[in-house]
Image (tube, rainbow, N blue to C red):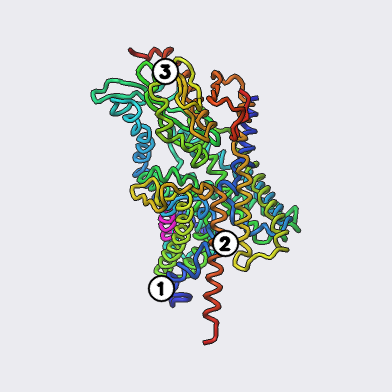
């Protein structure tokens, strides 16, 4: 139950609270470039989610078994603990490039019309910061973490898939807004990227409202915290302050 | 054969870059490791009075630091602790006396709380409230102007962040006291 | 080999304002938004990008005769990834706290469109001198873009520049109510959008002034 709870936390965190586009600023280039129409935006979101999952799977496997300090495969082959983490970034970018090639071949064979409508954007997913960012987050929790806190494959995949879902969510919302913006009188110099960024700022403000959701979810999921409740005593005896503190004590 | 001819450039580059990366690794690995350790050790003199450096030890699977004075005698403990804050994980260093009975000081290593509000938990105004508090019973957070013996004054407008820091301190000290007692490490 | 295309000096000058990577080419938006919450972070990122772009351009230019068409992206990527790893390690060794703050955005230089674009457009076609000048020009342009954004954000968000370093410069009075939103994501997006609009307006005014009959 607690493990499922931590998976849900990672999922909600990646999709909503720390949205890849609106909080971590990764994947901005397609976010601005491909968000003009709803169907292309949704297609791009799905493609990115697909590629991110494959890339996360492969990069977690490489990091866990080969690259991190004390990795099982390298110690087995070389006989002692070696730290190959300096090759991390090179391995990740090659994994990503191969994943994109794989997805491109798959889409060309099974969805030829979709392939044609994507055009040049499909190979461009290689330079999408969001995918490398997902790999880097996984690296942070596998390579640089204490042995008791290393992320398993399930958490890594959940982070990647729901990061992609969050990206799709943001890009689809933006596409919907931009389709309406086309009918508005936007000043000449702000047309295109300018107004998209300003709207993205307002979207980011809206998504900031999700901060703190994972904190209460975590409390709900973890049983037996083993910590005596810390009561908050208020000298004024007022019923409620205007903060987000709505937990029951 | 044609592919090998075309690939020889990539292979040669891979070898060249691999060699330069190995060189960079050898040259800088120690420095980076020292930086990571230094982050914690640098705070020890401020956290436990009389301490000039620290020594890492393992207690029940976690790394804690003995605070040592100039002669090498232990004058306290420094414990890294982390837990959920309002927005994301907060990492702390807790300074304790030798018996882990009193908190000597607190330092926030990293936090991602709301800038200007929750981030004020890093300020000494808030952290000073922990100095001298006993660890016999859990601490609580209050908004009254003069906090009592087991109470910490919260940061205005950042109740949840203040409460999170207090909870992290409580949880880790409870854990540490039992671990130290069972490992018979507590000394008078 | 005769020099085709722009001269080194032209490449250098173009990269600063006319072909500014952020404001004119709309490349490299990810670090522009992410690391501009402080001037110190912006300068460190610009320095890292300068190092990587310069080295990658020089190496690519030196081997440009040997590049086969379908292998060139692979070679660019390998080169850039290597230099980014080196830059990341150097930062972790010498400015550890800044490296921790910049976090994942240094390795994200690998997929920064600016560098791959310059390798593709300039370094793979022209000699090392031109490629080097292009790299320096584009990096200065990138640094200018980052500085413009980070000065606005840090000034309005904290009232001082270079906070946390030894060179902290208090510009606004201490009772300035910090516009906290500026150092948060929404402020980044909105500020960049407005500055982009400003840059577009300035460029179109300049173009119309040039085209006005004498």
Marking on residue B134:
3
Is residue A22 visible in the rendered image? The answer is: yes
Q: Where is residue A27 in the image (x, y as percent from the top left)?
A: 59, 52
Marks 3 and 2 close (CB-CB < 8 Å)? no
Q: Position of residue B75 (x, y in %)?
A: 31, 21
Is label 3 on the same chain as label 2?
no
Chain letter of disc 1 in the image: C
Occupied quadrant, residue A35: bottom right
Q: Foreground: C196 or A54?
A: C196
Check disc 1 and report its element: helix, strand or loop.
helix
Residue B135, above or below B25: above
C47 within the magenta span: yes
Location of the C terminus of chain A (image quadrant): top right
Is residue A80 visible in the rendered image? The answer is: no
Question: Which is closer to the viewer, label 3 or label 2?
Answer: 3
Occupied quadrant, residue C134: bottom left
Sooner in the amino-acid sequence: mark 1 or mark 2: 1
Location of the N terminus of chain A (image quadrant): top right
Question: Which is closer to the viewer, label 1 or label 2?
Answer: 1
Question: Which is closer to the viewer, label 1 or label 3?
Answer: 3
Marks 1 and 3 close (CB-CB < 8 Å)? no
Q: Give the extent of the magenta segment.
A: C45-55
Spatial separation of the CA atoms under disc 1 and disc 3? 69 Å
Check disc 2 and report its element: helix, strand or loop.
helix
**Residue carrying label 2:** C70
Is label 1 on the same chain as label 2?
yes
Marks 1 and 2 close (CB-CB < 8 Å)? no
**Residue carrying label 1:** C9
């Amino acid at each position: 139950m607690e493990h499922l709870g931590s998976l849900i936390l990672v999922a909600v965190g990646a999709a909503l609270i720390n949205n890849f586009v609106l909080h971590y600023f990764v994947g901005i280039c397609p976010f601005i470039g491909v968000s003009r129409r709803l169907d292309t935006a949704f297609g791009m979101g799905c493609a990115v989610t697909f590629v991110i999952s494959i890339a996360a799977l492969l990069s977690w496997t490489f990091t866990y078994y080969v690259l991190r300090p004390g990795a099982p495969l390298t110690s087995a082959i070389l006989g002692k603990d070696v730290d190959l983490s300096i090759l991390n970034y090179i391995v990740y970018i090659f994994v990503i490039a191969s994943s994109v090639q794989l997805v491109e071949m798959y889409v060309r064979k099974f969805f030829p019309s979709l392939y044609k409508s994507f055009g040049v954007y499909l190979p461009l997913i290689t330079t999408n910061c969001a995918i490398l960012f997902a790999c880097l987050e996984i690296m942070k929790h596998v390579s640089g973490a204490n042995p008791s806190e290393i992320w398993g494959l399930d958490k890594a995949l959940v982070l990647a898939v729901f990061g992609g879902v969050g990206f799709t969510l943001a890009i689809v919302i933006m596409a919907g807004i931009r389709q309406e913006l086309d009918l508005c009188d936007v000043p000449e110099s702000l047309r295109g990227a300018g107004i998209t960024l300003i709207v993205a700022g307002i979207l980011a403000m809206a998504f900031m409202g999700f901060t703190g959701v994972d904190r209460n979810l975590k409390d709900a999921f973890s049983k037996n915290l083993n910590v005596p409740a810390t009561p908050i005593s208020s000298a004024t005896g007022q019923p409620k302050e205007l903060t987000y503190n709505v937990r029951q004590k | 054969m044609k592919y090998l001819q075309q690939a020889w450039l990539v292979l040669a580059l891979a070898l060249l870059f691999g060699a330069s990366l190995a060189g960079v690794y050898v040259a800088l690995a120690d420095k980076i490791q020292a930086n990571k350790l230094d982050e914690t050790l640098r705070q020890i003199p401020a956290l436990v009075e009389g301490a000039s450096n620290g020594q890492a030890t393992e207690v029940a699977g976690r790394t804690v630091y003995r605070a040592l004075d100039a002669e090498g005698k232990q004058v306290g403990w420094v414990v890294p602790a982390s837990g959920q804050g309002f927005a994301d994980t907060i990492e702390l260093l807790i300074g304790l006396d030798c018996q882990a009975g009193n908190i000597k000081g607190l330092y926030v290593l990293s936090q991602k709380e709301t800038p200007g509000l929750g981030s004020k938990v890093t300020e000494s105004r808030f952290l000073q409230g922990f100095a001298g508090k006993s660890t016999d019973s859990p601490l609580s957070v209050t908004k009254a102007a003069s906090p009592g013996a087991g109470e910490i004054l919260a940061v205005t407008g950042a109740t949840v962040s203040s409460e999170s820091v207090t909870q992290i301190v409580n949880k880790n000290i409870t854990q540490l006291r039992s671990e130290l007692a069972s490992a018979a490490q507590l000394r008078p | 080999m005769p020099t085709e295309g722009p001269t080194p000096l032209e490449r250098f000058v173009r990269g600063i304002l006319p072909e500014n990577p952020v404001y004119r080419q709309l490349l490299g938006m990810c670090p522009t938004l992410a690391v501009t919450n402080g001037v110190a972070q912006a300068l460190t990122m610009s320095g890292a990008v300068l190092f990587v772009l310069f080295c990658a351009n020089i190496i690519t230019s030196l081997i440009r005769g040997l590049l086969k068409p379908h292998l060139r992206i692979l070679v660019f990527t390998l080169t850039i990834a290597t230099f980014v790893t080196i830059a990341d390690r150097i930062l972790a060794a010498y400015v550890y706290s800044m490296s921790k703050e910049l976090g994942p955005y240094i390795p994200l230089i690998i997929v920064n469109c600016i560098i791959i674009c310059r390798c593709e457009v300039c370094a793979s076609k022209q000699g090392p001198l031109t490629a080097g000048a292009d790299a320096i020009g584009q990096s200065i342009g990138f640094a200018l873009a980052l500085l413009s954004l980070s000065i606005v954000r840090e000034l309005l968000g904290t009232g001082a520049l270079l906070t946390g370093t030894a060179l902290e410069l208090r510009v606004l009075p201490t009772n300035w109510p910090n516009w906290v939103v500026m150092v948060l994501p929404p402020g980044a997006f909105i500020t960049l959008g407005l500055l982009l609009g400003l840059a577009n307006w300035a460029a179109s005014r300049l173009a119309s002034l040039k085209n006005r009959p004498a």
